[in-house]
Structure formats: structure tokens, C-alpha cells
Amino acid sequence: MAGLSKDSNPDRAAVSVWLGRQPLEPYDFPDWLGTYEREVASGMATGRLMEFVHSRWLVRQSLYGVSGHAPHLCRPVHGRPVASAEPEGWHLSLSHSHGMSACAVSSRQGIGVDIEPLYRDTNWRRIVHRWFTEREQDWLLAQPDQDTFLQVWTLKEAWLKATGRGIANNLQTLEVSANLDLLGDRPGETWHAALTQAEGYMIAVVWQDESTEAAPALHLVHASDEAHLVPAELERLSEQPWMICPMAQRTSAR
């Protein structure tokens, strides 16, 4: 179930994930935010504003990485940043958690990413009891720690983002088996899923692609001043293994 991406040109991979750490110190409200983004950000508390600005910076650096367009020429669509406005043709998904942001980019519609810190202590058994299917409960509650739960949780979150749904009442639309095979509710569509760990985080990606099951390209985005839109250093995490999770589709609703 494990495999490495063999893409010889990672910046042009159909699916890529870009990780960036949020700065520890607050920075001034950047002048590169668009008018709509400024309206959204106005009134945000410092912590939320830093997360918002960093995620929009990461979107632009990710689009620079896949397209070659300078970051100051890149921008997402208004509203939830699910696609690029400049340059056109890229689909996006964002995730934030405890100082880390992730942006997944795909050349096709249907992309979702979720990250969770490996060190975070959660009341995971309670979550499994309340929100997961009976079959998932049977095997997950027998696990000694939260590591496997984090795999399942991030897969479910990424699935909901990729299919455009919120978390409420939808966690059971993807069922995960003990060997991490997946059962979804979107028959007739070709979905793929992958898991990995990097920078202290569990990372799950779900995407739609009829032609390939290759693992996503994974990158770490470095910058000394993340408030400015200069091209960042993009590090390919080429040795990072991905676990590919086979996905089948339900033919009818459960």
C-alpha cells in the first residue's frame, strides 16, 4: 500500500501539496491582499489574521510552484479559495492546524487536503463512538493509541473537502476499513487517496483523476519574511513515502 511518487517533473505533477509554517511574530497587514481578501480579513483578531494571511501567501506560492507565474501575479477566486483566478485552471484545497498550513493543488476539480499534528492529544475514542460507523468503531476502538485514528480522521476530512461537503452529518460518507481501504458514496467518479507524515503532521489528500494513481508531489515552502510576495524557496520532500489507500464506491446510499 505504500509508494513513492515517480514524477520526473514534480512542479508539473497533477496533484501536489505545499506545506508552510506560520510565522511566530505578527506582521503588518500586507499590501498584496486583494480588495475582497482585505474585506474578509478586516476585524480579525491577530491570531486568526496571521493564519488567514499566511494561507493566502501559501496559495500564491503554491500557484507559483505549479505554474511558474510570479507569486504577485497569482490569486485565488473570491470566497473560499477552491480554485485559482490567476492563472486559471488550478483547483485548490486548504488546511490549517497549530501553526502549519497546507495547500493542495490539482489540475482537475475534486481535491481535498487535511493535516493534523501528530503530537496533539485528542479525546479520539469519544469522536469514534459518536461520529464513525459501527464497523469503523469495531476495529478503531481496539487500537492502543490515536495514531490510526488520525489517519482515518484526516482521510475523512480530505474526502469531505474534495467532494464539497461540510463535516456535519457527513463523516460516514467515507468508510475506512482496518487495512485503510476506503468506501465512498460517489459512484461513477474515479477517486484516489493517500496518506503521509511530514514535519510532525499527518497529511491526507483525496483527489479525482481518471488516468493515474501516482502519489502527490510534496513540498515545503520556506521564506524569511512571509508577509511579502517574493518567490519562496520550494523544497521537494522527494523521499517522503505515501501510503496509497484504495477507494471503492458504493452503488447506493447506506
Image (cartoon, helix red, strand yellow):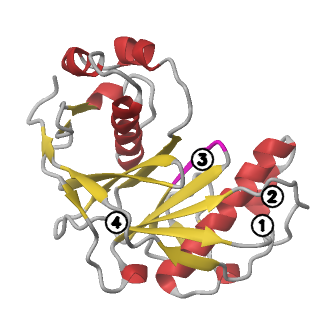
The residue identified by callout 4 is 216
Q: Which mark is residue 249?
A: none
Dot 1 or dot 4: first in sequence order is 1
Dot 1 or dot 2: first in sequence order is 1
**Residue 215 image offset from top left, x and y in percent:** 28, 64
Whole-number angstrom distance, CA of label 1 to CA of label 3: 19 Å
The 10 Å Cα crowd at callout 4, few under 14, some 14 to 19, many 20 or more, is many
Closer to the camera in the image, 119 or 186: 119
Dot 3 or dot 4: first in sequence order is 3
- Residues under numbered marks 1 and 3 in contact, where contact means CB atoms less than 8 Å apart: no
Dot 1 or dot 3: first in sequence order is 1
Whole-number angstrom distance, CA of label 1 to CA of label 4: 28 Å
Identify the magenta region: 94-98
The residue identified by callout 1 is 33
Q: Amino acid at mark 2?
A: Arg
**Residue 5 image offset from top left, x and y in percent:** 28, 71
